[in-house]
Image (tube, rainbow, N blue to C red):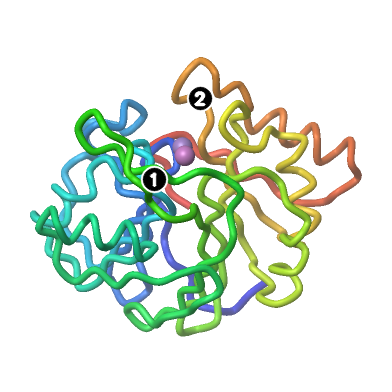
Amino acid sequence: MSQHPRPKFTYLGHATILCELPEGEVVLIDPWVQNNPACPEALKKLDRIDAMLITHAHSDHMGDAVELARRHKPKTVVANFEICSWLGTKGVENCSGMNLGGCQEVLGMQVTMVRADHSCGISDGDQILYGGTAAGYIVRLAGGFTFYHAGDTALFSDMQLLGEMYRPELAFLPIGDHFTMDPQQAARACRFLGVRKVIPIHWGTFPVLTGTPEKLEQALGDQGTSCEVIGLKPGEIY
Ligand code: NI
Ligand code: MN
């Protein structure tokens, strides 16, 4: 058990997480809200966004980044260098591009960009532009609470290294299959990371995303890994 002050996480559906810090500031991870079919209507109107973290350029992760940034004027928008350059051309201010392995302070949090095995093209009109590499984030709050948002990724064994180095207490892991890990791979990821709690993301939004929190629970049991599955439905809070 941790004594660290914990943020409040609201699952907006798919891979989008609204994180309210203990001080009240709001971080939006993977800004896909208005056009996210999984996001409950009542939650589509956000009061404030103080920072945005973008894992990669696919529209189901940053489809509403430009509009939300224009409206809410976050202090910092974090993404890789290529995405930040592109967002800049669309009028998004305060972009702070980074790259894998790097860390920067955002609203008092230490945000480390880490590997994800996935693609990262930017859809712009009918073109797909080069968008750098996809990423995940290790986020360490000022009080010490640490979580990992994997973005879209396949399983990779360096998740064990992330576990050793950062000791995240909580992981947001994709489980849907087809574009990312399935529940079997996500269960192995939980073991590599050494996390006690996992919140499944990137499932159920479309028919091809067949993984479910129940299947993840089953896979963890089959693999003998003890990790609590917090199966949030869109709109639910942890
Ligand atoms: Ni993707
Ligand atoms: Mn995706």
Q: Given the image, on which type of amino acid does mark 1 rest?
A: Thr
Q: Is mark 1 within 8 Å of ligand 2?
A: no
Provide residue 112's location: percent of width, then percent of height: 51, 73
> Does mark 2 have its CB less than 8 Å from ligand 2?
no
In the drawing, what numbered circle is on residue 16? 1
Name the residue rendered at 30%, 48% in the picture: 31
Question: Residue 123 at what x, y percent from top left?
Answer: 29, 37
Q: Is residue 40 above or below residue 61?
A: above
Which is more toward the observer, 184 or 153?
153
Amino acid type at image mark 2: Gly
Answer with left or right where residue 107 lies relative to residue 158: left
Would residue 59 appear left or right of 205 to someone viewing this image?
Answer: left
Question: Quick one: which residue is furthest to the top in this view?
Answer: 207
The answer to whether 218 is drawn above or below residue 29 in the figure is above
Which residue occupies 24% across, 31% down?
35
What residue lies at 71% left-to-right and 42% top-to-bottom? 186
Mark 2 neighbour density, 10 Å: few (under 14) some (14–19) many (20 or more): some
Q: Does dot 1 land on a helix, a strand or a loop?
A: strand
Which of the labelled discs sits on residue 121, or is there none? none
Front one among 193 and 130: 130
Number of marks present in the image shown: 2
Q: Image point 38% across, 40% down: which residue?
A: 58
Quadrant housing the N terminus: bottom right
Q: Which residue is mark 2?
A: 204
Q: Earlier in the sequence, mark 2 or mark 1?
A: 1
Mark 2 residue element? loop
Residue 210 position (above or below residue 56): above
